[in-house]
Image: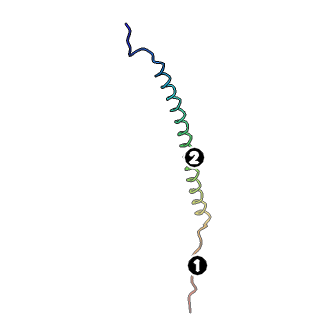
């Protein structure tokens, strides 16, 4: 028995293949962009933590001036 719903449609097949290729390329671009942002955020966070610990351990904070007592 011939069923119209189960026959292959070459036009639909080409359309879906093209859409799948486009979606794969878009997913690759978005993934690489997200990874770049993640690496940049991690680098910035590491730099901030390292700077904070270095300042705390080396006592790099400027010392406050003390006034001389007047006699």
Q: Which residue is mark 1?
A: 65
* Crowd around label 1: few <14 · some 14–19 · many ≥20 (10 Å): few
Question: In what element is the residue under mark 2?
Answer: helix
Residue 34, compared with residue 20, is above or below; it is below
Residue 58 location, x and y as percent?
62, 64
Residue 41 location, x and y as percent?
55, 50
Furthest toward the front, the residue is 11
Q: Which residue corresponds to the image point at 59% horizontal and 68% vertical from the top-left?
A: 61
Question: In what element is the residue under mark 1?
Answer: loop
Furthest toward the bottom, the residue is 71
Residue 16 location, x and y as percent?
48, 25
CA gap, disc 2 and disc 1: 41 Å
- The quarter in which the N terminus is drawn is top left
Residue 63 location, x and y as percent?
59, 73
- The quarter in which the C terminus is drawn is bottom right
Disc on the earlier residue, 2 or 1 = 2
Circle on res. 39: 2
> Which of the 4 image quadrants contains residue 48?
bottom right
Q: Which residue corresponds to the image point at 51% horizontal and 25% vertical from the top-left?
A: 17
The one nearer the camera, 46 or 20, is 20
Mark 2 or 1: in front is 2
Residue 30, compared with residue 5, is above or below; it is below
Q: Which residue corresponds to the image point at 47% horizontal and 21% vertical from the top-left?
A: 11
Q: Which residue corresponds to the image point at 56% horizontal and 87% vertical from the top-left?
A: 69
* Crowd around label 2: few <14 · some 14–19 · many ≥20 (10 Å): few
Residue 30, compared with residue 8, is above or below; it is below
């Amino acid at each position: 028995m011939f069923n119209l719903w189960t026959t292959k449609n070459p036009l639909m097949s080409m359309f879906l293949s093209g859409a799948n290729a486009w979606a794969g390329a878009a997913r690759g671009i978005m993934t690489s962009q997200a990874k770049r942002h993640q690496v940049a955020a991690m680098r910035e966070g590491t730099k901030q933590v390292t700077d904070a610990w270095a300042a705390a351990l080396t006592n790099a904070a400027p010392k406050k001036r003390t006034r001389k007592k007047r006699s």
